[in-house]
Amino acid sequence: MTAGTADGDRREPDGTERGWRAAAQEALYGPEGFYRRPEGPAGHFRTSVHASALFAGAVARLLCRVDEALGRPPVLDFVDMAAGRGELVTGVLAALPEETAARTRAYAVELADRPGGLDPRVEWRAEPPERVTGLLFANEWLDNVPVEVAETDSTGTARRVLVRADGTERLGEPVGGDEAAWLARWWPLGGEEGLRAEIGLDRDRAWASAVAAVERGVAVVVDYGHLAEARPPFGTLTGFRDGRETLPVPDGSCDITAHVAVDACAAAPGLPGARLLTQREALRALGVTGARPPLALASTDPAAYVRALAGAGEAAELTAEGGLGDFWWVVQVVGMAEEFDVFGSVPDGLGDLPEGFGGLPEGFGGLPEGSGDLPEGSGSGER
Ligand SMILES: C[S@@+](CC[C@H](N)C(=O)[O-])C[C@H]1O[C@@H](n2cnc3c(N)ncnc32)[C@H](O)[C@@H]1O
């Protein structure tokens, strides 16, 4: 074994040690990869899409706003980027008004195979279509785009972390070239030994390439992440298996994920200006508020009241502090008037949400203020 390779993609002579990017690429998307398995992502963790149909409803509302701004084109594209098993695109089609659904061309872009029983209106593909007019929406994609990991040695030099299939690591060669420039711009490491960063260059490129498919419309990526002023000093690389957080081991047995440097993605070369907002802000602007249903409903229609409470609880989960509500939405508007504010008061033809979807009674649902991350091993599976 040599003391580091010049290229994180190249295998060491014994074939077992690589940079994290190549190791995770094979572990997640290789022939035996984690994401090729039949159970799909929902078998291991819960995204906003699985948490509540309110999420797909909000995305449908967003699509309707984009549709209005585009002047209701004869064909309106909706691209569910990194679609998992197509749950979001299915929910969006179900939530659209009939007339809009009839004009909508729905795509699921995914590396895994098309699941059986998917709505035949959905075109399943491995790459985004060209020339999208409409909305491209990527929920929890970029955290699964593999990244190189850098760690500082005893002299303060940032070196590539090499990993074996069993998860053991050692430091490889110093990070150079574009990757070093990315670190300097977006995630400078101090001189202290043992600091770590995840190099988001490939994520920025992946996002820029997806946005490039949009000719006119809006592209949105939603993920957990961080901004330059608050990078985690030791990185965030994590594994998930069967609903539990685990050590990241690149052997295909678990998900491998790292929080996204969302400000870097938003500013990737070639992209139009971006708007960054939290999921809490975005969903509230799309009508998912978690506000309480009127108490009077409890006596006039108890069943409706209980249903409304359940909906309010789901809205609270999607917008929770310390949970899904802290996710970032990166929004890029392409080929439309720059002043178009998709989260402003744009008519969308959907009217108000059903009564009760606005409310949360005191003490019902939601995470307590400042509850922070889920405890390790909680098994809820929300990432
Ligand atoms: C965490 S799952 C999210 C699934 C779904 N969007 C959701 O929110 O439930 C990430 C998905 O991204 C897919 N993926 C990763 N890279 C991709 C790529 N380049 N093109 C298409 N799909 C990709 C994976 O196969 C996996 O299904």
Image (cartoon, helix red, strand yellow):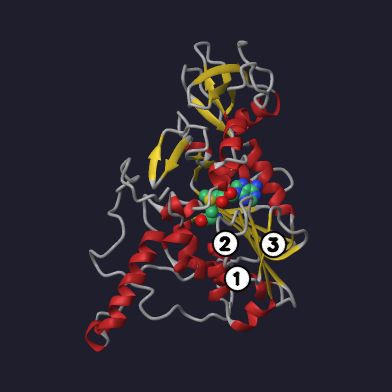
- Give the spatial CA distance, label 1 vs label 2: 9 Å
* Mark nearer the N terminus (1 vs 2): 2
- Residue picked out by circle 1: 119
Mark 3 and mark 1 in contact? Answer it, CB < 8 Å.
Answer: no
- Residue picked out by circle 3: 338
- Residue picked out by circle 2: 86
Please give the count of numbered marks on the rendered protein: 3
Three-letter code, disc 2: Gly
Residue 26 in sight from this viewpoint? yes
For label 2, being within 8 Å of ligand 1 is answered: no
Please give left or right for residue 365 compared with residue 67 in the image: left
Mark 1 and mark 2 in contact? Answer it, CB < 8 Å.
Answer: yes
For label 3, being within 8 Å of ligand 1 is answered: no
Three-letter code, disc 1: Asp
Q: Where on the picture, by quarter, is residue 76?
A: bottom right
Instruction: Give residue 182's position: percent from left, percent from top.
Output: 64, 31
- Give the spatial CA distance, label 3 vs label 1: 35 Å
